[in-house]
Every structure is written in C-alpha cells, then in structure tokens.
C-alpha cells in the first residue's frame, strides 16, 4: 500500500504460560519495535498492538504442572511478560489480554456472525479421547511422531522441529499428555471453517502479495497447492478453558485458540481506543502489518484473513514479515529443557544493557533462515562494534569538543570538500537504513547504522584534529564541527534499534528528547550550541561474564534433569483422605491389552476378592515382570471401562517429571495380601 494514512502494527500474542526468551524477541518483538519506532520518528500515525494469549491447551497444561488454576497461570505470566517488554524498550501502545471481558464479547460476536451467515459447518468427527482421563484431547494434549520429519515430540497441531502444521490424527504413535495412555477415537460435534470451499478467496488474497518474503508466500502457496488442498478446520474444542462457544448444543466447548487469539489484536485496540478503534481495522487507508514467527504463518495468512473476509468490513494484512527461528549455542531453544536465555533474567544479570542485547539480536535476526545466538558473539559485538566503533567515535568527539572549546560547537566554520563528503556519506547510510527498515531488512539497517559510526571514525582518523589543533585552529574547528554533525546524525539514526543509547547520546549532545527522522538531513548541532559532559555509551564485557552465562545455561539444564519434580497438588482434608481404601494386593495374572502398547490387564488378589485392573504401565513393566508382584491398590475407586475392559481399581505408582513410573513397594518383608495402607 502506497502512502497509507495510518499503520496498525501487531506483534504475535505470546502464550501466557511462561516468560519471554530471546527466540521470541528475535522472531517478532524486536523487529516490530524497530519498525514502529522508525514510523513514529518519520511522523507516521501508528498503533502498536500486542497482548497475552491466555487461552488454549498450553495454559491448562502449565496449570496442571504447577498445581494452580489456569487463571493463576495467565495472571502471573501476563504481568511478567508485560514488565519485561517494557523494561526492554518494546514500546507497545497496548498490551491486552484475551481473558478480558472486551475480548470475550468481541470473539463471541465474530463467531455468531459467521454462524448466523452459515459460514461455519457443523460436523460430527472422530477425535482422540483419553479413556483414563475421561476427556477429549485438544491438539496440545496429544504428542507423537511427526509424519514429516519423524520428530518424536510433535504436538497434535504442529511439529516444532520442522514447523509442519498437523492434525492429531496424522501423528504416529499418539499419546495423551494427561495420562500417557494411547488415546482412542470417539465421535464428537464441532463447528468448522470450510477452508476448502473458501480457498478461491484465499488464493486471490495471497496472489495480491507475491512481494511478501519468500518464506511466507511460499509456505502459504504450498498449503493451497498441496495434493488435497486446504481442508476444513475446526473452530471449536472440547475444553473447559477458553471463550465458550455461544450457541445452543455447544455446551462444554470453547473457541479454538487460533480463532480466538488473532481477534485479540482487535479487542486490545478496542480497549485502547473505544471510540475510534474501527479506523485502525476497517479504514482501507490503514496499512495492517503482522509481525510473527514462521510457526504462525498459516494462522495469520490463511485462517485469520479468512475469518475477517467472511465477517466482512475489516481490512486484511498488507504485510506479514515472518522470521525464522533463532537457535542458542548451536541447539534449538527449548523451554522444556530450559535451554533458553530468558529476558527477565537477562535484565537482572545485565542492568542497563538492554541495547547490547537489542544490538546482538538485530545482528543475528533470523530473517530468511534460522540463525544462532552465542554468548561469545554477544561479547564480541559489544566489545568490537558497540564499544570500539560507535562508543569510541562519540566519546572522542564529545571529549575533544569539551577539551578544545569548553563543550561549545565551533561557529563560522568553512567546510572543505572532504568534510562535505563525510557528511554526505553518513546521510546516504541513513537513507539506505530507512529503505532497509521499510522493507523489513533489519540486519541490513543495523549495518547501515554502524556505517555512520565507521564513517565518523574514519573521518577522525584521516583528519587527526588532535594534531591539526597545534598548527591550524580554524581547520580544527571545521573538522570538529563535521564530526559533531555525524554524531548528531547518529543521535537520530540509532533510535529505532538502540533507544536507550539514543536517549543517553541526546543527553550528551544536549538535543531534544524527540528527534524526527528527517532531522538527520540537517546540521543538528549549530555553532554556539552547548554540549554536556561526556559519558561512556558502552563498556567492555569481560570473559568471566560470558563464562558465567554459559555455566548458568548448562547448569540449569543439568539441574532440571536431576531435580525436576512434579508440583504439589491442591490441599485435601483429612476426611477426604480417609475415604480412600488403599491395600496391598498381589498380581496373579497379567497380559497386554490388545491394540495398545501402554496398557496391561491384570488380575489382582486384594485380600477382599480377585479383581481386574487395567493400568498404563506396559512401557515400564512387562506382563511377565508384574506376575507375583505386590502392588499398592486403591480398591474403592469407581469402576470404569478402558478399551472395553472394566477396570476395578487403580495401582498406585511413583512418577517423576519425565513420566517414568515405578511401583510403590516396601523394603520390609512381604506384607500380607489385603493389608491396609494408612
């Protein structure tokens, strides 16, 4: 879109189930912030929208692990993420929440609109069901082997190893994350977005954006051109956490998180601008830009635009500059393995050094392919580029001006062709930086920013004003005036990438807090202008600091592996406890349950009777190993059918955080069968 009146810029809503790490930052939050800061400096009317995604299975899984409610989880991590973003300088206009009443009303209106128009189709399908947990399994409650790359840890909706979008039934060897059992297929009713019937509209929209980044456009077209094409996708789930499906017959169901979450951008805008929000989402002269990671491409380029088109009245994204993945020290960032650099911890370990991380991430941003962050590279970029190039140039200019002229910019200087050439070269770098940002090439923009500093350093090295001062005072004044103007250009140009440093530099140069981008074309430091005292913009990072971070990274992984235990569950009363009848039983027979790889069917002597128990322990104990074993069994648990077999009790096992099971046994002599456990 040429010359839009305004910009609506969104950054992907992060799941409120954990803190922010550097992969998130490099993926979409830092590039979007650089872009928005540049737009604001350029005088554009822009709103920067984000918020926490507080629904979906990732939240409920976290709640179960921490032994708290889903609301407790989202409250905790919404606050943590919001504070970390603010401290890091990610300057959102609003950071909303998808648990807000505004969002619930907004998402409900969207669903009702599509339902009443007949867009959504009601279908009865077979979905995975966990018989042990007595629950239908949403996408993230199922793991298995990815059919594309054979990664054994793929989720039911996506493989995070290869980025493929999946459906649960495509997984090989599916397993419930709730009980570890192999799920069965059971019929349930849900409401689908018929992407197959709407693929013509989607294709037409996408073909208007062939100029999108190749990774974005290519992935979208591969979906459209796949053998079976686009398929209907369920917009509802059998869950109890989320926005309730607002129609009769849908009790106990909630909106699919990828129907719900992108609408959160609109909800947050409504909360920010209750009277004028429509201008930012419905006016055709508004440019909509979504910053996301590559794992969200299908949702933002196919599903969300389809929802908006079918609703009607909304603009569609003009740009979706998705980035690839950032790795850490040569390995994939993994929150489950604690292989990550967490933003809130970085801010604690490196106070006042937000811009060092912003610089390092901008330099390694995975714009067209996966890239790697290392602590050694972080150190070298700080010491060899920020300190030696940018910081060194600014420090020399300000120190010499204070030394020679008491901090007053020289007046009535006569610039030579060499001086003008240096200024022209610096301003040409600003122009290239501008073009790079507008084309979402942030690594290129960073290089042009540093070219300004390098131009200044080379100019000083060539001119040597510290020598000229001894022989030609007038020429020295022109040299220092020129170097000061390059410093002024830097005060404008570094703002999008290094906002904290820009603020410090403006203070030293005694310039206004806000400097418009076009000011880089001017001589900002006029003759007679008074500077303030010099201070170091950056300081060296020593080897021991980097060593400590590497040790912390490796230690956290080791500690997690050796000491990670399941969290405590909710407190129960003594009366609840004494209702349980736990006894010592003896396994008389055992055999695998047909067509499963996790279940054993056993006959157990409880001392009261001989009963059948089905238990998901086959991956830990064979049938032969179990025969003759003493087990601890809950005998007054209500019977229920598992794979067609009525199970009349539950064996009590010890389970660690990795899911390994062990029998609960005594070191004493064999206990009498039927003995009670108190």
Image: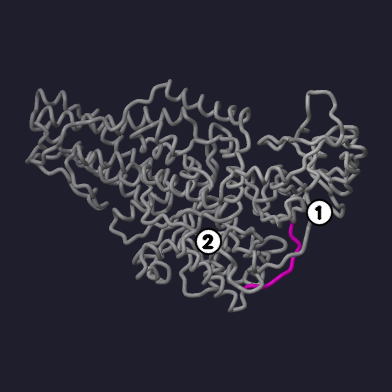
**Of helix, strand and loop, which one carries label 1?**
strand
Image disc number at residue 379: none
Indicate the quadrant where residue 604 lies. Answer: top right
For the N terminus, the image quarter is bottom left
x and y percent of residue 206 in the render? 55, 65
x and y percent of residue 72 in the render? 51, 49
Please give the name of the residue rendered at 43% of the width and 48% of the height, measured from the top-left corner: 79
- Outermost bottom residue: 117
Q: Is residue 10 left or right of residue 390?
A: right
> What is the span of residues highlighted in magenta in the rendered image?
120-128
Foreground: 467 or 274?
A: 274
x and y percent of residue 434 in the render? 34, 51
x and y percent of residue 195 in the render? 64, 68
Image disc number at residue 210: 2
For the C terminus, the image quarter is top right
Give the residue pinned by disc 1. Answer: 640
Foreground: 472 or 237?
A: 237
- Outermost right residue: 589
Q: Is residue 43 left or right of residue 376?
A: left
Q: Is residue 318 magenta?
A: no
Please give the name of the residue rendered at 55% of the width and 27% of the height, measured from the top-left corner: 554
3D distance between C-alphas at marks 2 and 1: 56 Å
Q: Is residue 122 magenta?
A: yes
Q: Is residue 188 left or right of residue 1?
A: right
């Amino acid at each position: 879109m040429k010359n839009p009146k305004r910009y609506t810029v969104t950054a992907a809503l992060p799941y409120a189930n954990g803190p922010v790490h550097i992969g998130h930052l490099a993926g979409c939050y830092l590039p979007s912030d650089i872009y928005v800061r540049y737009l604001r400096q350029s005088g554009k009317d822009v709103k920067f929208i984000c918020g926490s995604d507080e629904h979906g299975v990732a939240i409920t899984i976290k709640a179960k692990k921490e032994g708290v409610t889903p609301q407790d989880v989202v409250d905790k991590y919404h606050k943590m993420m919001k504070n970390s973003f603010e401290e890091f300088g990610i300057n959102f206009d609003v950071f909303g929440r998808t648990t807000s009443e505004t969002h619930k009303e907004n998402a409900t209106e969207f669903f009702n609109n599509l339902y009443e128009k007949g867009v959504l189709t009601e279908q009865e399908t077979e979905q995975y069901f966990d018989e042990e947990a007595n629950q239908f399994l949403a996408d993230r409650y199922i793991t298995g082997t990815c059919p594309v790359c054979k990664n054994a840890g793929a989720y039911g909706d996506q493989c995070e190893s290869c980025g493929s979008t999946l459906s649960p039934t495509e997984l090989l060897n599916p397993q419930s994350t709730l009980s570890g059992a192999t799920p069965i297929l059971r019929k349930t009713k849900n409401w689908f977005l018929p992407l197959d019937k709407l693929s013509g509209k989607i294709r037409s929209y996408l073909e208007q954006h062939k100029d999108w980044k190749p990774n974005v456009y290519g992935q979208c077209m591969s979906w459209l051109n796949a053998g079976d094409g686009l398929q209907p996708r369920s917009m509802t789930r059998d869950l109890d956490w989320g926005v309730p499906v607002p129609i009769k017959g849908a009790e106990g169901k909630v909106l699919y998180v990828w129907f719900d979450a992108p609408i959160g951008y609109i909800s947050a805008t409504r909360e920010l601008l209750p009277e004028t929000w429509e201008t930012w989402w419905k006016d055709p002269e508004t440019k909509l830009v979504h910053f996301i990671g590559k794992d969200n491409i299908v949702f933002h380029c196919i599903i969300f635009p389809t929802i908006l088109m079918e609703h009607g009245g909304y603009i569609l994204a003009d740009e979706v500059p998705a980035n690839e993945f950032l790795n850490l020290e040569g390995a994939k960032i993994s929150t489950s393995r604690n292989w990550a650099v967490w933003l809130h911890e970085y801010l604690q370990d490196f106070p006042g050094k937000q811009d060092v991380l912003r610089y390092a991430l901008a330099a390694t941003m995975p714009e067209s392919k996966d890239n790697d962050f290392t602590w050694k590279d972080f150190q070298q970029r700080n010491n060899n580029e920020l300190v030696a190039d940018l910081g060194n140039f600014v420090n020399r200019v300000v120190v010499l001006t204070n030394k020679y002229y008491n901090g007053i910019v020289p007046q009535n200087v006569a610039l030579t062709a060499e001086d003008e050439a240096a200024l022209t070269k610096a301003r040409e770098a600003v122009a290239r930086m501008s073009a790079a940002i507008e084309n979402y090439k942030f690594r290129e923009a960073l290089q042009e920013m540093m070219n300004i500093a390098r131009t200044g350093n080379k100019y000083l090295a060539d001119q040597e004003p510290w020598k000229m001062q001894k022989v030609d005072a007038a020429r020295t004044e022109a040299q220092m005036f020129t170097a000061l103007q390059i410093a002024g250009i830097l005060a404008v140009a570094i703002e999008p990438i290094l906002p904290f440093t820009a603020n410090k530099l403006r203070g030293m140069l005694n310039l206004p807090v806000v400097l418009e981008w076009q000011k880089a074309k001017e001589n900002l430091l006029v003759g007679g202008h008074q500077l303030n005292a010099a201070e170091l913009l950056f300081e060296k990072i020593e080897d021991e600091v980097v060593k400590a971070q590497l040790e912390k990274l490796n230690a956290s992984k080791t500690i997690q592996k050796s000491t990670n235990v399941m969290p405590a569950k909710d407190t129960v009363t003594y009366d609840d406890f004494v209702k349980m009848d736990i006894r010592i039983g003896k396994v008389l027979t055992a055999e695998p349950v047909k067509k499963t790889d996790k279940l054993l069917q056993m006959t157990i002597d409880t001392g009261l009777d001989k009963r059948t128990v089905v238990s998901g322990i086959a991956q830990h104990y064979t049938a032969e190993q179990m025969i003759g074993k003493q087990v601890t069994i809950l005998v007054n648990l209500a019977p229920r059918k598992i794979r067609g077999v009525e199970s009349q009790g539950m064996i009590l096992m010890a389970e660690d955080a990795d899911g390994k099971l062990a029998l609960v046994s005594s070191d004493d002599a064999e206990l009498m069968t039927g003995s009670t456990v108190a």
